[in-house]
Image: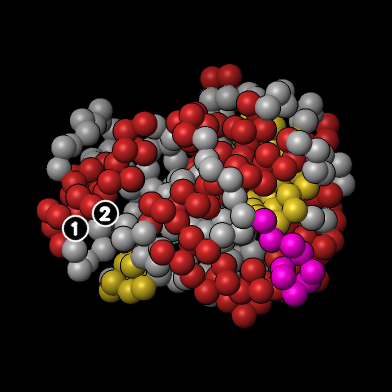
Amino acid sequence: MHVFASHQHRSHHAYELQRGKLALSTESPDRAERIRDALKNAGHALSKPDELDHDLLQRVHDAKYLEFLSSAWRRWAAEVDADAPAMAISWPERGRNVIRPENIVGQLGYHSFGADCSIVDGTWEAAMAAASLAHSATNAVITGAHVAYALCRPPGHHATKDQFGGYCYLNNSAIAAQRLRDAGNKRVAVLDVDYHHGNGTQAIFYDRADVLTISIHADPTHEFPWFTGHAAESGSGDGVGHNLNYPLSKGSSFDAFRTALILAVEHIVATDVEALVIALGVDAYVDDPLGTFTITTEDFAKMGAIISECHLPTVIVQEGGYATDALGTNVAAFLSAF
Ligand code: OKP
Ligand code: ZN
């Protein structure tokens, strides 16, 4: 399997508000190092990413957002505090047409949806490297590989066209899906198995029929991202019927997960999907500090085997997973079964 990885992720370790206190994020550099080590030990050769196509980035994210992300740290450090993470403290009121503020503090509120992540020196460089890994893995598939994996960090599935949040800045899975579309695949599916709802990917493709988005996750009634991920969210406009959510109760086992997964795979196979992106979070793991599901390493292998039955060219993009000691084993189990 083609595996793409980069050391650039090390430039990013943000702070997050945890139970009312600012702390170094659970989304740590160690995560990617552990996955990298496990994949190396499993015999995978690691490839470096190529340069990211800026036009592709602009087909997924708003130009103003990209301009903001690329300069936010510099502006914050110069205008606010070079020794503190750049974070929002206020967000727009619901249900109004919002005018984008000029000030960096105001723009942080405009371009984010939570205080679970922040921008530090090196965040943009790491987010860009993760996006280029997704892009490179997709290029490998476009040029004939059946499957390729991108070890993306920071993750991406919570990032919308113009907002960061949930540890995500650039939506790596959406970038892979858009690249697959641009290469001529008529219809593409993104299957998100991360424990959390892939709200950003859903939002980016919500009104489009050419990208089917499916997410299996903890019911947002009781779990981050709280406001999206319900079964009734099915798409809008041209996209009606092209978004599927499978919210599962807290504490769900692989039995419940597998039932949803099989429905998702059947849906992909039954419609005219030509290429697949798997948003591979492994935080559904039994010992994950952020999750409540009881999925085991063996279950991740079964998950990989079930999804491989789609028999589609596939880009696998790393999303969450925070049980650091087991991360590499879980990702390797999924990949080898796939
Ligand atoms: C990102 B991904 C615990 C609160 C966590 C944010 C969760 C982001 C998950 N400190 N809130 O989907 O794995
Ligand atoms: Zn997650």
Mark 2 residue CB less than 8 A from any atom of ligand 1: no
Q: In this picture, which residue range is highlighted in magenta?
A: 39-47
Residue 217 appears anywhere in the view: no
> SS for tag 1?
helix
Task: Identify the residue at horizontal 84%, vertical 61% (top origin).
Answer: 337
128 left or right of 263 in image: left
Q: On screen, 253 above or below 60?
A: below
Percent position of residue 128, x then y: 46, 48
Task: Identify the residue at horizontal 58%, vertical 19% (top origin).
Answer: 238
**In this orientation, which residue lies closer to the viewer: 25 or 247?**
25
- Farthest residue toward the top? 238
Percent position of residue 93, x then y: 23, 40
Mark 1 residue crowding within 10 angstroms, few (<14) / some (14–19) / many (20+): some
> SS for tag 2?
helix
Residue pointed to by mark 2: 73
- Pick the quarter of the image with the C terminus: bottom right
Mark 2 residue crowding within 10 angstroms, few (<14) / some (14–19) / many (20+): many
Task: Identify the residue at horizontal 52%, vertical 59% (top origin).
Answer: 153
Amino acid beneath label 1: Ala
**In this orientation, which residue lies closer to the viewer: 140 or 257?**
140
Residue pointed to by mark 1: 77
Q: On screen, 215 above or below 101?
A: below
Q: Quadrant of residue 85?
A: bottom left
Q: Quadrant of residue 173?
A: top right
Task: Identify the residue at horizontal 14%, vertical 55% (top origin).
Answer: 78
Q: Quadrant of residue 245?
A: top right
Q: CA distance from mark 2 to mark 1?
A: 6 Å
Callout 2–callout 1 Cβ contact below 8 Å: yes
